Amino acid sequence: MLIRRNGKVRLYLNATPGATRKDSESVEYPKSKKYFVWSDGEVVKRTDSLKTAEETFSSESGVDGRMKIGKTNVKELV
């Protein structure tokens, strides 16, 4: 299940281990670990920690953090 996306970098929750999802690009879910970061057609990080997955996502995509509910102006992001 897709959690976050920025360009070609995606952060997934591994809800279906070992499955392959085929949309415009084929994403192969790893057989283990709870979260994984996918970039440019390959898995770059597998982990059980959401914090580690988000740090890897941020470094790969250049995003500098999460939206803060009630504090982030979403109109500027669109």
Image (cartoon, rainbow, N blue to C red):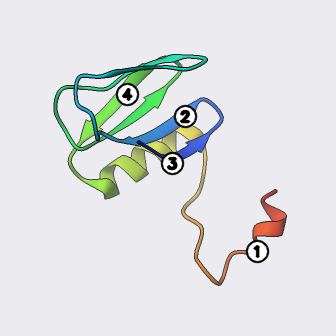
- Determine the secondary structure under disc 2: strand
- Amino acid carrying label 1: it is Asn
Residue 77 position within the rendered picture, expressed as x and y whole percent measured from the top left: 78, 60
From the image, tell me which residue sits under label 1: 73
1 and 2 marks in contact (CB < 8 Å): no
Q: Is residue 75 left or right of residue 26?
A: right
Disc nearer the start of the sequence (1/4): 4
Name the foreground residue: 56 vs 67. Answer: 67
Q: Give the class, few, some or many, for how many residues have Cα within 10 Å of label 1's Cα (few <14, many ≥20).
A: few
Q: Give the class, few, some or many, for how many residues have Cα within 10 Å of label 3's Cα (few <14, many ≥20).
A: some
- Amino acid carrying label 4: it is Val
From the image, tell me which residue sits under label 2: 9
How far apart, in angstroms, are the residues tagged by discs 1 and 3?
19 Å
Residue 44 position within the rendered picture, expressed as x and y whole percent measured from the top left: 37, 27
- Determine the secondary structure under disc 4: strand
How far apart, in angstroms, are the residues tagged by discs 1 and 4?
30 Å
Q: In the figure, 68 relative to 58: above or below?
A: below
- Determine the secondary structure under disc 3: helix
- Asked where in the image residue 25 lies, by quadrant, the reply is top right
Q: Give the class, few, some or many, for how many residues have Cα within 10 Å of label 4's Cα (few <14, many ≥20).
A: some
3 and 2 marks in contact (CB < 8 Å): no
Disc nearer the start of the sequence (3/2): 2
How far apart, in angstroms, are the residues tagged by discs 1 and 2?
23 Å
Q: Residue at horizontal 29%, vertical 41%?
A: 15
- Asked where in the image residue 17 lies, by quadrant, the reply is top left
Which mark is drawn over residue 62?
none
How far apart, in angstroms, are the residues tagged by discs 3 and 2?
9 Å
Residue 30 position within the rendered picture, expressed as x and y whole percent measured from the top left: 25, 26
1 and 3 marks in contact (CB < 8 Å): no
From the image, tell me which residue sits under label 4: 44
Q: Residue at horizontal 27%, vertical 34%?
A: 16
Q: In the figure, 52 relative to 60: above or below?
A: below
